[in-house]
Amino acid sequence: MKLISLFLTTLISITALAKQCETIRVGCANAWYPIAYILPADKEKAGGIAVETIRRAAQSLGISASFNCHIPWTRAMKYMDTGEIDMIAGHYLTEYRQKNWAVTTPLLADDIRAIYTDKNLDILTLEQLTSLTGVIPRGASYGREIDTFLKEGIARKKVAQVDKNMAVFRMLQRNRVDYGIISIKDAKEHIKQLGLKDSIYLSSSLGLNTIHVSFSKKSHCAVHLEKFNQLIKTYHQNGLIERFLKQAEQSYIVNE
């Protein structure tokens, strides 16, 4: 009887928490192709693989989702810790996030590269950046090895931070830095749309990161973590993630 009573109490508690999650408040990057971004045709709407995954999963669970891609990325990280947002639409995995957030199964993997304008640099390894000046999006994290190099290691005093990926490209074009760090999909899309094929070069791969969506552990909506995991696996199997990528290819426009 005690076991039955405990099971019923747990079930009732989970159901009660789920009922409190009527709308998932989602924070997202404003220009991270193809993961999350503000749609150019409507500045109040969001698109991207992570956004569409959350939107579809929430719909399947009978929950609404609201997206705010206007929050500065560093503030969105803080809101995940305080519970002021319920989810973050797309992020790389770090030890801190894995410990403090309710992290989903991966959406996809992301190849991290250095981009640069001096072809003679021929960047093949992270160590080649040691004597160079760099720039990264503010609050960005690229995995332990790259983060340690950029933020804690010998290169830390030579790396600037900017608010948008576009600013990374502009600083390179104005010769204010030697390199920027960015994912290969995002880099190639910017290079294509900005017509920089012959002036911006890509390094060899500096690291491979998985991309996730996560719940704040302080959110009532976190009870849906396993359901989201199951749905994400289904979206991989039925090709929906790939369709979200194709959708991003058609809807993303690089903005200043």
Image (cartoon, grey):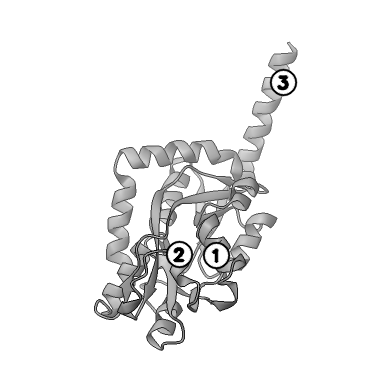
Under mark 1, the amino acid is Phe
Q: Secondary structure at mark 1?
A: helix
Under mark 2, the amino acid is Leu
* Residue receiving disc 2: 126
Q: Secondary structure at mark 3?
A: helix
* Residue receiving disc 3: 6
Percent of width and height locating residue 174: 41, 89
Q: Residue furthest right?
A: 2
Labels 3, 2: front one? 2
Percent of width and height locating residue 231: 42, 39
Cα–Cα span, label 1 and label 3 = 49 Å
Q: Residues within 10 Å of mark 3 (few under 14, many from 20)?
A: few
Cα–Cα span, label 2 and label 1 = 8 Å
Is 33 left or right of 83, judged from the image as shown?
left
Q: Is residue 93 above or below residue 237?
A: below
Under mark 3, the amino acid is Leu
For the residues bearing labels 2 and 1, Cβ distance under 8 angstroms: yes
**Would you say residue 141 is visible in this rendering?**
no
Tell me which residue sits at (55%, 40%) in the image: 224
Q: Is residue 51 above or below residue 239?
A: below
- Near-viewer residue (137 or 70): 137
Cα–Cα span, label 3 and label 2 = 53 Å
* Residue receiving disc 1: 149
Q: Residue furthest bottom?
A: 174
Q: Which of marks 1 and 2 precedes in the sequence? A: 2
Tell me which residue sits at (66%, 36%) in the image: 16
Q: Residues within 10 Å of mark 1 (few under 14, many from 20)?
A: some
- Near-viewer residue (129 or 191): 129
Percent of width and height locating residue 191: 30, 74
Q: Is residue 230 above or below residue 208?
A: above
The N terminus lies in quadrant: top right
Tell me which residue sits at (28%, 81%) in the image: 199
